[in-house]
Amino acid sequence: MNRLQRRIRSTLSEFGLNQTALAAQMKVSSSDLSLQLKRNMTMRSAINLSESLFVLTGVELTLHDFKE
């Protein structure tokens, strides 16, 4: 699990949420989100991910979170 995956999972768990809730907010399937987190994502996907996490939790991702 990379840094981004750990950050997202820990943030979601703090709020009693899971990856399925984030995927629903992003309007993608849970499996699509999982694939996006495992490989290099486009800037559009990164922004969508960051904005969706913020809507659900109020937590903002930084560029540091996306570094491996």
Image (cartoon, grey):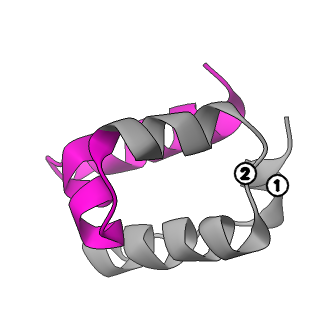
The answer, for residue 47, to whether it is visible in the render is: yes
Q: Which residue is mark 2?
A: 65
Determine if residue 18 is in view.
no
Residue 38 place in picture, x, y as percent: 64, 31
> What residue is shown at x 66% (from left), y 66% (from top)?
46
Distance of label 1 from label 2 (alpha carbons): 4 Å
Which percent across, then down, holds residue 62? 73, 66
- Disc 2 marks which amino acid? Asp
- To which quarter of the image does residue 19 belong? top left
| SS majority, magenta | helix
Q: Measuring 46% from the left and 35% from the top, which residue is drawn there?
A: 34
Stretch of the chain drawn in magenta: 1-30
On the image, which quarter does residue 60 sit in?
A: bottom right
User: Which residue type does callout 1 highlight?
Assistant: His
Residue displayed at 39% across by 49% down: 11
Can you say which quadrant of the picture contains the C terminus?
Answer: top right
The reply to whether discs 1 and 2 touch (Cβ–Cβ < 8 Å) is yes
Q: Is residue 13 above or below residue 59?
A: above
Quarter the N terminus occupies: top right
Image coordinates for residue 25, horizontal then vertical, percent = 26, 70
**Image-quadrant location for residue 61:** bottom right
Give the residue pinned by disc 1. 64
